[in-house]
């Protein structure tokens, strides 16, 4: 599946300006490091709403909790303690961890096993994971051995415990940021904040409008690793948006490009021409997961899946002459673009 460290932002740029009004209302902004990348919060502060110091404390408490539960870059996190266990083990888990395992299973079943939360050992073998030594095309014996430690079907939930019948390891990299965005958005709403833009490692959610009444705008980048080029601009209210791409983390060997986008069924990076997928959905969690799933499936099967499930998805394909784009019908309706 698409990989992040936790995740480098892929394909999304914020288009916003901070302004103030004479009535005392203001548009606040703060951010900082998280998940190996960055987060940022913008919100409209009306009279009686908390200031950025108080809001930041709540946001960073959520980020700290997510890191403690889900990070694969710290050995004392809940999920890394589980990953260190042998086969036929169980461990009590916080409810959010179990919730995300269930979401991962749904996405795995929907993709017939192409998407898989336990693909981490394969990522390490190819050189993309947190325990990777070097980027390389592995030997067939090495690949066969590692594939025995991969498979969502080896996980099960027993009451409040997560269990495994094989030495699999769980990596929430493909959905953790979207989940975190939703958590922060809910917290902001609980504080009475009704207009905000939340971004965590490139995953976004926008609610309400900016201080001047204009909508929040998100720019979609072309999937290039040499420069930032805006493909189009979306206006959002009440939606999360996620882009997954193959262009920020890859290597080339023998004239072939190997990206960090894996199909768990083959144990290898995908070889199709789909460079990036953007998904817009009410939940940033599902936008995050679907963008990864569609990127793995590729341009044809991914579009078929998006149309079947009414997912608002924007596909960017790599060609000899540059990039070409396609939009699902749900994306066309949502973005207001002209149908082909």
Image: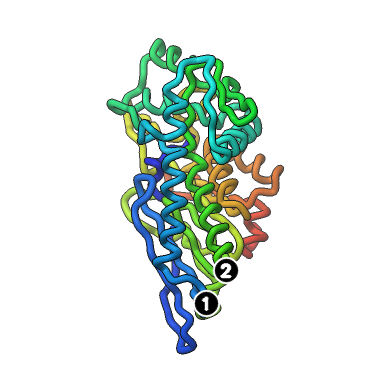
Question: Which corner quadrant of the image does residue 95 belong to?
Answer: top right
Q: Residue at x 45, y 64 (%)?
A: 55
Image coloring type: rainbow
Taking the image as drawn, is residue 10 in sight?
Answer: no
Q: Nearer the viewer, residue 293 or 239?
A: 239
In the image, is residue 219 above or below residue 311?
below
Q: Quadrant of the C terminus?
A: bottom right
Mark 1 and mark 2: Cα distance apart in space: 9 Å
In the image, is residue 158 above or below residue 166?
below
Label number found at residue 48: 1
Q: Nearer the viewer, residue 324 or 175?
A: 175
Q: Nearer the viewer, residue 127 or 325?
A: 127
Label number found at residue 125: none
Q: Residue at x 51, y 73 (%)?
A: 49
Left or right placement of residue 257 versus residue 313 in this view: left
Q: Residue at x 40, y 44 (%)?
A: 7
Label number found at residue 192: 2
Q: Secondary structure at mark 2?
A: loop
Determine whether label 1 and label 2 are within 8 Å by CB. yes
Q: Earlier in the sequence, mark 1 or mark 2?
A: 1
């Amino acid at each position: 599946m698409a990989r992040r460290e936790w995740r480098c932002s892929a394909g999304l740029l914020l288009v916003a300006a901070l302004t103030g009004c004479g009535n005392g209302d203001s548009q606040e902004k703060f951010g900082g490091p998280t998940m190996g990348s960055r987060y940022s919060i913008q919100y409209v502060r009306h009279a009686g709403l908390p200031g950025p110091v108080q809001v930041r404390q709540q946001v960073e408490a959520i980020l700290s909790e997510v890191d403690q539960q889900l990070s694969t870059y710290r050995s004392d996190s809940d999920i890394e303690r589980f990953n260190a266990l042998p086969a036929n083990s169980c461990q009590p888990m916080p409810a959010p961890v179990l919730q995300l395992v269930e979401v991962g299973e749904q996405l795995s079943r929907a993709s017939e096993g192409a998407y898989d939360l336990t693909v981490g050992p394969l990522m390490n073998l190819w050189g993309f994971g947190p325990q990777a030594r070097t980027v390389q095309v592995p030997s067939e014996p090495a690949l066969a051995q590692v594939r025995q430690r991969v498979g969502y079907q080896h996980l099960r939930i027993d009451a409040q415990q997560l269990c495994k019948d094989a030495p699999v390891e769980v990596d929430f990299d493909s959905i953790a940021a979207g989940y975190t965005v939703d958590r922060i958005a809910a917290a902001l709403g609980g504080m009475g904040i009704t207009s905000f833009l939340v971004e965590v490692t490139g995953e976004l959610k926008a609610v309400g409008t900016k201080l001047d009444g204009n909508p929040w705008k998100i720019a979609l980048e072309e999937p290039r690793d040499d420069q930032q080029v805006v493909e189009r601009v979306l206006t959002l209210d009440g939606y999360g948006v996620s882009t997954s791409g193959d262009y920020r983390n890859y290597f080339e060997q023998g004239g072939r490009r190997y990206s960090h986008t894996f199909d768990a069924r083959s144990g290898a990076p995908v070889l199709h021409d789909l460079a990036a997928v953007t998904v817009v959905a009410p939940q940033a969690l599902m936008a995050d997961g679907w963008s990864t799933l569609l990127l793995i499936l590729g341009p044809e099967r991914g579009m078929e899946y998006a149309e079947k499930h009414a997912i608002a998805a924007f596909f960017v394909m790599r060609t000899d002459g540059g990039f070409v784009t396609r939009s699902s019908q749900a994306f066309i309706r949502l973005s207001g673009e002209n149908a082909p």
